Amino acid sequence: MKAVVQRVASASVEVEGRTVSAIGPGLLVLVGIHDLDSHSDADYICRKVLNMRLFPNDKSGKTWDQNVMQKNYEVLLVSQFTLYGILKGNKPDFHVAMPPDKAKSLYASLVQTFQTTYRSDAVRDGVFGAMMKVNLVNDGPVTMQLESPQSSSNTKDGVEAESTTNGK
């Protein structure tokens, strides 16, 4: 599972011209699900994202000192299968992304994990599978990339297997 985490002053998601989710200060998290991902990958991503020290401590003056929970900020999760896109020439190929019918339940489980680990009222999400317009005001900007260990080895294995198959 991959996550692109952005520290934001605010973020929102629109579907068909209607705002479906919005947050103030916090984290916008774009989530890609690999075909072989499981609940353990979701648990890892949740734990790492919620504990990333991406915010300053106003009392001590330390810059990278507090996580989203310590700041009492919000999290907006957005499913994005294109994080597992691979360019084949100039055309994207998404064969390593989990198919939507399987990914929907794992993504819902990820959202639930965030809500129970943090606070349900502080975690919002987009609409799985919908064409979304994601609006954000970056804070910094601060952007971090994260990948669960299982997905990381799956991706490397897939690339190595392709390279061998293609004779490269």
Image (cartoon, grey):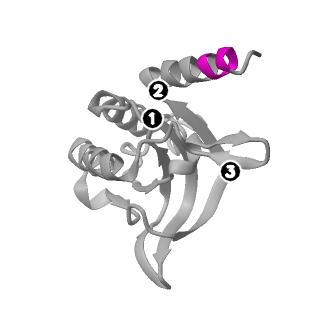
User: On the picture, is 40 further left or further right than 58?
Assistant: left
Secondary structure under badge 1?
A: loop
Going by the numbered disc 1, the residue's amino acid type is: Met
Q: Which residue is mark 1?
A: 1
Tell me, yes or no, whether the highlighted magenta stretch contains residue 152: no
Taking depth in this image into account, of 149 and 154 the one nearest to the observer is 154
Q: Earlier in the sequence, mark 2 or mark 3?
A: 3
Mark 2 vs mark 3, CA separation in Å: 28 Å
What residue is at 69 percent from the left and 50 percent from the top? 141
User: On the picture, is 161 further left or further right than 27?
Assistant: right
Going by the numbered disc 3, the residue's amino acid type is: Gly
Dots 1 and 2: beta carbons under 8 Å? yes
Q: Which residue is mark 3?
A: 140
Q: Earlier in the sequence, mark 1 or mark 2?
A: 1
The residue carrying pointer 2 sits among few (fewer than 14), some (14 to 19) or many (20 or more) residues within 10 Å by Cα, namely some
Q: Which residue is mark 2?
A: 151
- The boundaries of the magenta stretch are 161-165
Taking depth in this image into account, of 161 and 133 the one nearest to the observer is 161
